[in-house]
Image (cartoon, coloured by chain):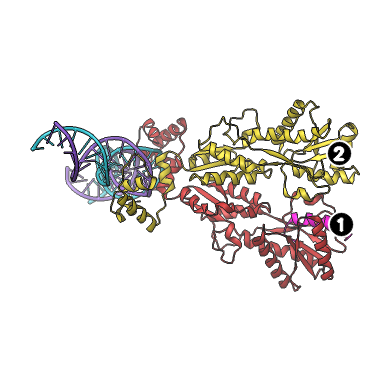
Chain colours: A yellow, B red, C cyan, D purple
Amino acid sequence: MRDVASASGVSPATVSFVLNGVSDQTISPATRQRVEEAARELNYVPHGIARALREGSSRIVLLDLDPLFRGGGTESYVRGLEDELAQHGHVLLVHHDSAASRSSMQAVIDGVRPRAVISLSGLYGPERDAADDGGRVDGLAAHSAVQVRHLVDAGHTSIAFALPDGDRATRLSAARLRFAGESARTLGVEPPIELRLPIDPTDAGARVTDFLARQPKVTAIATFDDVVALRLLPVLRTLGIAVPERIAVIGFDDIEYGAFSTPALTSVHIDAEGFGRTAARRALGLDEESTSPAVPAHVIQRESA
Amino acid sequence: MRDVASASGVSPATVSFVLNGVSDQTISPATRQRVEEAARELNYVPHGIARALREGSSRIVLLDLDPLFRGGGTESYVRGLEDELAQHGHVLLVHHDSAASRSSMQAVIDGVRPRAVISLSGLYGPERDAADDGGRVDGLAAHSAVQVRHLVDAGHTSIAFALPDGDRATRLSAARLRFAGESARTLGVEPPIELRLPIDPTDAGARVTDFLARQPKVTAIATFDDVVALRLLPVLRTLGIAVPERIAVIGFDDIEYGAFSTPALTSVHIDAEGFGRTAARRALGLDEESTSPAVPAHVIQRESA
DNA sequence: TGGCGGCACTAAATCGAATTAGTGACGCTC
DNA sequence: GAGCGTCACTAATTCGATTTAGTGCCGCCA
């Protein structure tokens, strides 16, 4: 900045005023132009660290991402966040919160002094004290409702909810199951019955056979996400269970491969990018938290439900 | 820091000396202890931004991650990086380099002044001017060789290399194809013939039928990764092509689901976490770049090859 | 012609740590 | 007992921007 100042024959303070467009300072057009030109000439870029020191926080927004959140629209969510932040001169950085480094989050925060932290990690616990996620969790509830409603509208009254077996995504899938239960209740049907699907297709087949024997009234399965649905479909096929005639299946996320399964997977499309944008705007304090975002979800109707 | 200084009755400089263990300063044990205690008491954490300003760069290492690198061991790679960096007081932050924000990378660098940047994005172009990746690319070449050698050792002399159709991962898959070609040549067989596999299984079936009609001598297919292999297997099954009898298939990455396909997928296991650790050590200048890391790959022999 | 207000800037403090150049006190030697 | 060296610290500068409190100059009015 000092170089720019001396190149344009003014003081560093003036350069700062010009480059930041400080409104309560009067700068003559001539000076303004000289400074701008000098800055361009020397291709000056503000030193983010110095600025952060003075301002108290950097222009970085931190996303605390649990491996839990692989897939499930997170990629789009990140894209939305990043784009929107870039539009306001901020930058998104992701901290991948592996179990080993759980404690490192504080170190990261102390190290970068981010403008805001968006934490998806602690979001599904009972406390919900993490930063605002752009309504993505609330959206999840609303979107679970869309999934269940599609089945109920089609006449199903006894529904199962399939989620992955093992402890990889327990908190998130527990939340989804809860949301599904709530919306079922609102729609006047029984809450979905939990069906944990093992990874091994043989085990899964046994599990499904057993499940359907115990729950003969079940005619539809909503799944945790499309990945589960795409594992479920071949299992049902091997068992000779017709989809959607005997059992209807609806996924969640609308991933690419869903269109190519047999039968093609009906799913719920979620505008994760929109949630990302909202989260960004809220993190920067541009939107009111209270205004609930109208990020819609809709059913992608294909063959399986 | 000033608080710690006055609490322990010394100057800020002394606090800095104590807390950073500056070696060419003599501090009396008594003082040292008083300072350390005061720091603990006030739970003082160094202000990363201020430190970064003084030192010229922050204790952040930036990973520039292209969506290209979804999967394929990247998750483990990140874990390895993060763990190793944490061990040396550094922190990993990931910049998700979406196409829209390609230009934002410079902004990020100016904003955080990272200690090092590890860029996987530009790594497969002809220039290779990006930062050291811990030998992951070179590893990729070596590991491609492992994949091809397994087939050659089993007596195959005419090999295909299956990669995803579409332009999502072109640069990376082109590199893999090249590496496979090189190792085939070294082993004295013809370089693998490219087979692009469309996502739609029907299209894929047609493509494979056509391919095998044109290349009747092909008896084995090495794939870009396990995901491609897991798409290929059902396609071959539908076409009535016996695996591994008529066509052997070997994947790459050793993902979890590979053990549960029919037939179970033979694959190459890669220690991506090890590459991450190496990349971290190199980024911090702890290892020589020249010492080639002995991060091994080995074949996970199952049924498909 | 003295005083006042506004314009267009500048000087200097500030953010929090790291670091260089000292400084006072003490011990030791000749 | 003057001089030197070591020990155990401290004062003050630095990093690069932002920001507050001025300052000099000009014009205008009484």
Q: Quadrant of residue A225?
A: top right
Q: The residue marked by circle 2 belongs to what chain?
A: A
Element carrying mark 2: loop
Instruction: Please say whether residue B219 is visible from this viewpoint.
Output: no
Circle 1 residue: B237
Element carrying mark 1: helix
Instruction: Please say whether residue B156 is visible from this viewpoint.
Output: yes
Quadrant in the picture for the C terminus of chain A? top right
Q: Nearer the viewer, residue B219 or A287?
A: A287
For badge 2, the amino acid type reads Ile
Give the magenta-colored segment's residue range.
Answer: B223-241
Along the horizontal axis of the image, is A29 left or right of A287? left
Q: Looking at the picture, do discs 2 and 1 lie on one chain?
A: no
Q: Residues within 10 Å of mark 2 (few under 14, many from 20)?
A: some
Can you tell which mark lies on residue B260?
A: none
User: Where residue B151 sits in the image (x, y, percent)?
Assistant: 79, 65
Residue found at x 61% / y 60%: B135
Q: Residues within 10 Å of mark 1 (few under 14, many from 20)?
A: some
Q: Quadrant of residue B160?
A: bottom right
For badge 1, the amino acid type reads Arg
How far apart marks 2 and 1 lie (CA) works out to: 25 Å
User: Where residue A233 sits in the image (x, y, percent)?
Assistant: 83, 45
Q: The residue marked by circle 1 belongs to what chain?
A: B
Q: Are marks 2 and 1 in contact (CB under 8 Å)?
A: no
Front of the two marks 2 and 1: 2
User: Where residue B194 sits in the image (x, y, percent)?
Assistant: 74, 66
Along the horizontal axis of the image, is B106 left or right of B28? right
Residue found at x 88% / y 46%: A237
Residue C21 versus residue B137 in the image, above or below = above
Circle 2 residue: A247
Q: Nearer the viewer, residue D1 or A88?
A: A88
